[in-house]
Image (cartoon, rainbow, N blue to C red):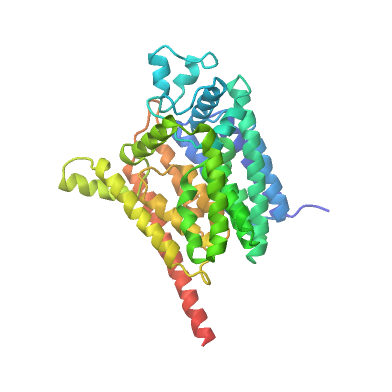
Amino acid sequence: MPLSLSKKLSFILVGVSGILYLYLGYFIERHQSFTLMASYTVLFLIFIYFSRNSQFSVRGVVFIALTFRLLFFFSIPVLSDDIYRFIWDGKLLHEGIHPFAHVPSWFVNNDQLPNSINIELYGNLNSPEYFTIYPPMAQVLFWLSTFSKSILGSVIIFRVFTFAVETGTILLLIKLSDLYSLPRKNVILYAFNPLVILELTGNLHLESFMIFFLLLGIYAYKRTQFNVVGISMALAVGAKLIPLIVYPVFLRRLSLKKLFILYFSSAGLLILLFWPLYDRALVHGMSSSISLYFQKFEFNASIYYLVRELGFLLKGYNIIATAGPWLSVITFLLILGLALFSNPQKDRTPSVWLWILFVYFSMAIIVHPWYVTSLIALGVLTKYRFPILWSGLIFLSYLGYNETGYDENMLVVIIEYGLLFTFIAYEVNQVLKQRKLSKIAVR
């Protein structure tokens, strides 16, 4: 039986996507802005087509999406150099050295470079003057990955773990779609999204593990397995610290007994995870890294850049040292308000978590493209599609990279957030209208 024209087009688009992923994985440099943007734009348009008009079943699209991830297996990340810090920390652990004991430059300046680490690895680090910021479970993954002595070998091992949790995430999204009575095809919004594929399996960011355990926590919550919720949340925090901000959501949604079970199991596992690395070096190193994060670095921010410009007007200098801590306080209060004043009967947990993370990122000083992947995953389980738009717009931040470093283009930032916040206002307005109509219909 001959294939229809639309089916033929779908096969062609799959082939084009595969070629572009191979190109982005093996043959491009981060500073090649034009080809990078052109490739991503084509991939994103193909993704939009498949999310709306795919001629394949959901299972077929998921299979294709997983195949795209496999194309990266033997590539070393080129759009991010975080992997080198992962390998650095892992090799320190193999040498019996606490990863928070010293900044990388200390080993070089004091001629104390461990036997398993060469100067080439050190040269690839993006922040040799700063302590690592990765929590215990992440450190376990780094340690396991560095049983291979080569960089490529470590990358492959880490990518096996990443592929496993990405597969698990997609399966969880399918199960959660059923539990929330949502169309299964929504999973395409995550599985086939080029930002997710490139940043998680391609560039190997820890969001893949965080997302998997967050979704596992939601799945356990829906099945009233509150000890499993606590364990899943602890593992999410063990991968990245960010999930700590969604813990307050349970305060209005569970009885005291259930809250105790959830928080006790979570706290117990967090203690077990942190205990092997716990000493003065951990406290000093992590607190130093977090402090620097909020007071020194800037990248692709939104509200913070407005505050910074106000600071230039009023003070005449960059007020990051004071604005960063104050923004974090305001963020905490906004998150607490969302958690405590959301309606447990109307506002589903994924939706509240989505808005909490969005508030955090909108107030943050640093917003890397891969941060948005967690919003995409949660957005699949809600009515909101602004994370999909953001996944297309935030890739524009790569335009700032050049052969010598990074030079941020503020016009690009204005376009990104101008379109994003406009679309969010539209979506929120639509949801409010639907709720109003529902109330009228009930009356």
Residue farthest along the bottom direction in this orientation: 443
Indicate whether 379 appears above or below 408. Answer: below
Q: Give me the residue at 23% from left, 40% from top.
A: 318
Q: Position of residue 166 (x, y in %)?
A: 63, 44
Depth order, front residue of 2/34: 34
Q: Give me the residue at 57% from left, 28% from top.
A: 76
**Figure quadrant of residue 400:** top left
Q: How many marks?
A: 0
Indicate whether 273 appears above or below 131. Answer: below
Indicate whether 224 appears above or below 233. Answer: below
Residue 382 seen in this snapshot: no
Q: Give me the residue at 49% from left, 26% from top.
A: 98
- Left or right, 241 with respect to 365, comes to right
Q: Position of residue 252 (x, y in %)?
A: 48, 66
- Left or right, 371 with respect to 137, comes to left
Residue 99 seen in this snapshot: yes
**Figure quadrant of residue 358:** bottom left
Q: Position of residue 421 (x, y in %)?
A: 39, 58
Q: Give me the residue at 44% from left, 66% from top.
A: 428
- Left or right, 440 with respect to 155, comes to left
Q: Position of residue 185 (x, y in %)?
A: 65, 58
